[in-house]
Image (cartoon, grey):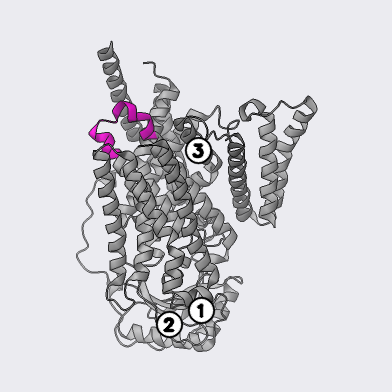
């Protein structure tokens, strides 16, 4: 259950990241309040994911955290590409 | 032309990446397959239908003991691999100079399981780190690893500014070169931690081969061949005594190894050593409990203490991933595939950027044919290896050699086809048939499995579904790429 | 004009090849010296392993640094000299 949770948290992180760079990814610019929220999300979500992953044990947790980062990033990128396509 | 840090690093990234990338694709692809080497071996031996977590009985251990004693009497130096979650059989093995061979015993009854001779998944594993060239190959792999790290370092310098903002940017609808560059950057940046970790730990596994712990001056002194044979290599005189019952020794060893499972047992004339299983944790240790022969009295424990030794054990553990659960193993597999895709897309980009300027040159065509024979030829030969395993008669003598022959033969044919097509400057004509062949072999894998090992499919559905499903998925992806290539024209 | 550009490119490529050869020739001994300095400390096999861990992590960085600019090459050479002196002092 930990991998899906960290994966979702990384999805959230990348979504926030995408909204913080609206021109690069073709989104409308966020209001200052929304930008602030996205910034907090981008920082907090990976931290929570790391805490969750650490519960699996040192080495396994770190591996899980990084691989959920990679796969979540890949999923977001593919979704963005298909949206533009 | 003005030389900047970025252009200089771009040149280094391109050339270092291309020169070593051809080799790196082979190393990464076979390394990725090695993540499931035991499972591939089980797929390649459908006669072995022992389910996972089958309990080990004393009868089986006694049978193994007598078989080992029998082999020792014949002067064969054997060891015993104990059942694990991935490989539930009791294996009495010895090294024949090229691979570990021996008898597989049923952990319930101790009866030998008549399995076909095969190279199995260990073929990919040994190819991954030796390129089938022994120590020379391992040294080449290590040097390639360092050059790959240099290519990654220079790549980071080039893209440092857009690294974070563009982390999930992929423009498939843009120009072809842009699309390929985005795809290359996407997999490179997202899988950068994994790629660096796996290359660095891989180089560290055989660090002594490129950074030997001897003074530099001694490197140029010729080593004299030993004049007298080492005394330890001779078989012990006399008949070795029968082994004590193994079950109580395993219980004692488990207690001495702080509850860790035993992985394998080594036998010497006066003692036997029970080693901790590699699957017991991320620290890949060689901790073992020694027992005196023939009475089986515990002699003591051998461990490697110290912080540095533990760091090294973690590095080894991270690379071999033997501690990994099936889920983590799949993450390793996916990450390995993406790292392979990173190198593969880099190779394609290198050629695309130079096609307009150097496409007519012979060097370019050679580079292109090598790229095609690596990117599509290797998957074809890996799949041909699996097909060959099932097509050859099970009782055929030297069938494991035939499997290697089939692997290399398919690869040579692909390389020949690629060079023929690129010499005529028909690049797509080389990619497309080879992609079609991958789709055919990959997509046909479930059918082949069902026709030639249907009983094993029923008894071990997870392993067979995973391997056949992966073959099918590869076929679908390859057909999609082929369609995209068709859209681009000749 | 075209000939000039071709010559320019050839010269640049020659410079770069010389640069990477020098970078490798300088960085590898420096990494070896660093490893041997660390291995020279008391601790037996463990310090050799530590030396290898550090030297192998540093080797690609040293090559990139050497190749990047003249200043990088000089700094790696200086690091190598320091490693040799330390090695001599320790031994």
| Separation (CA) of disc 1 from disc 2 | 9 Å
Chain where mark 1 sits: B
Foreground residue, B189 or C46?
A: B189
Q: Is residue B244 magenta?
A: no
B30 displayed left or right of B247? left
Pick out the residue farthest to the right: A33
| Separation (CA) of disc 2 from disc 3 | 47 Å
Q: Is residue B360 magenta?
A: yes
User: Which disc, if any, is residue B183?
Assistant: 3
Quadrant including the N terminus of chain B: top left
Q: Main secondary structure of the magenta part?
A: helix
Foreground residue, B368 or B442?
A: B442
Position above or below: B36 against C34: below
Q: Are marks 1 and 2 on the same chain?
A: yes
Neighbour tally class for label 3: few under 14, some 14-19, many 20 plus, Cα within 10 Å: many
Q: Are marks 1 and 2 in contact (CB under 8 Å)?
A: yes
Neighbour tally class for label 2: few under 14, some 14-19, many 20 plus, Cα within 10 Å: some
Q: Residue C25: where, in percent of width, then height?
A: 32, 34
Range of the magenta residues?
B350-367
Q: Quadrant of residue C87?
A: top left
For marks 1 and 2, the one nearer the N-term is 1
Q: Are marks 1 and 3 in contact (CB under 8 Å)?
A: no
| Separation (CA) of disc 1 from disc 3 | 43 Å
Mark whose residue sits in front, 2 or 3: 3
Q: Residue B454: where, in percent of width, then height?
A: 47, 75
Chain where mark 2 sits: B
Q: Check disc 2 and report the residue beneath it.
A: B113
From this viewpoint, is residue B458 visible?
yes
């Amino acid at each position: 259950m930990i991998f899906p949770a960290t994966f979702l948290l990384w999805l959230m992180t990348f979504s926030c990241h995408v909204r913080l760079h609206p021109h690069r990814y073709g989104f409308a610019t966020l209001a200052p309040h929304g930008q602030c929220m996205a910034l907090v999300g981008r920082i907090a979500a990976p931290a929570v994911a790391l805490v969750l992953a650490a519960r699996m044990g040192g080495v396994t947790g770190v591996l899980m955290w990084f691989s959920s980062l990679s796969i979540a990033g890949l999923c977001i990128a593919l979704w963005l590409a298909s949206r533009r396509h | 032309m003005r030389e900047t840090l970025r252009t200089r690093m771009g040149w280094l990234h391109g050339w270092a990446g291309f020169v070593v990338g051809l080799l790196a694709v082979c190393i990464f692809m076979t390394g990725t397959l090695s993540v499931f080497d035991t499972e591939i071996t089980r797929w390649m031996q459908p006669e072995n239908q022992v389910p996972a977590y089958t309990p080990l009985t004393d009868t089986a251990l006694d049978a193994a003991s007598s078989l080992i004693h029998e082999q020792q009497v014949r002067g064969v130096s054997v060891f015993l691999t104990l059942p694990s979650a991935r490989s539930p059989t009791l294996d009495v093995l010895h090294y024949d100079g090229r691979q570990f061979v021996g008898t597989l015993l049923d952990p319930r009854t101790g009866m030998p399981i008549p399995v076909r001779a095969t190279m199995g998944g260990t073929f990919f594993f040994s190819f991954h780190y030796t390129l089938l060239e022994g120590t020379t190959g391992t040294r080449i792999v290590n040097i390639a690893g360092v050059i790959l790290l240099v290519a990654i370092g220079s790549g980071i310098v080039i893209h440092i500014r857009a690294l974070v903002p563009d982390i999930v940017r992929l423009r498939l609808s843009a120009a072809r070169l842009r699309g390929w560059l985005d795809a290359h950057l996407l997999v490179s940046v997202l899988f950068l931690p994994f790629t660096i970790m796996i290359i660095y730990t891989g180089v560290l596994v055989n660090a002594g081969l490129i950074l030997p712990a001897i003074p530099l001056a001694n490197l140029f002194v010729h080593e004299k061949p030993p004049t007298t044979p080492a005394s330890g290599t001779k078989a012990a005189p006399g008949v070795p005594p029968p082994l004590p019952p193994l079950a109580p020794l395993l219980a004692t060893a488990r207690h001495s190894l702080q509850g860790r499972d035993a992985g394998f047992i080594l036998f010497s004339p006066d003692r036997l050593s029970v080693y901790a299983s590699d699957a017991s944790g991320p620290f890949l240790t060689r901790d073992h409990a020694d027992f005196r022969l023939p009475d089986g009295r515990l002699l003591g424990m051998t461990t490697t203490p110290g912080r540095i030794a533990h760091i090294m054990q973690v590095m080894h553990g991270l690379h071999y991933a033997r501690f990994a659960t099936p889920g983590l193993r799949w993450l390793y597999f996916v990450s390995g595939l993406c790292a392979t895709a990173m190198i593969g897309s880099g190779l394609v980009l290198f050629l695309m950027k130079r096609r307009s300027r150097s496409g007519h040159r012979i060097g370019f065509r050679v580079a292109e044919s090598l790229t095609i024979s690596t990117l599509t030829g290797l998957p074809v030969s890996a799949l041909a290896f699996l097909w060959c395993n099932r097509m050859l008669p099970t009782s055929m003598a030297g069938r494991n050699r035939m499997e290697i022959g089939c692997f290399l033969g398919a690869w040579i044919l692909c390389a020949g086809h690629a060079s023929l097509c690129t010499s005529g400057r028909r690049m797509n004509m080389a990619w497309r048939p080879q992609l079609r062949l991958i789709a055919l072999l990959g997509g046909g894998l479930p059918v082949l499995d069902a026709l030639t090992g249907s009983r094993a499919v029923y008894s071990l559905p997870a392993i067979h579904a995973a391997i056949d499903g992966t073959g099918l998925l590869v076929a679908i992806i390859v057909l999609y790429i082929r369609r995209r290539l068709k859209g681009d024209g000749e | 004009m075209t000939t000039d550009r071709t010559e320019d490119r050839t010269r640049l490529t020659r410079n770069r090849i010389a640069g990477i050869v020098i970078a490798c020739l300088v960085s590898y001994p420096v990494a070896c010296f660093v490893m041997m300095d660390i291995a020279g400390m008391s601790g037996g096999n463990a310090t050799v392993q530590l030396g290898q861990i550090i030297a192998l992590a540093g080797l690609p960085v040293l090559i990139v640094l050497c190749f990047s600019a003249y200043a990088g090459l000089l700094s790696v050479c200086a690091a190598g000299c320091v490693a040799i002196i330390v090695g001599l002092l320790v031994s």
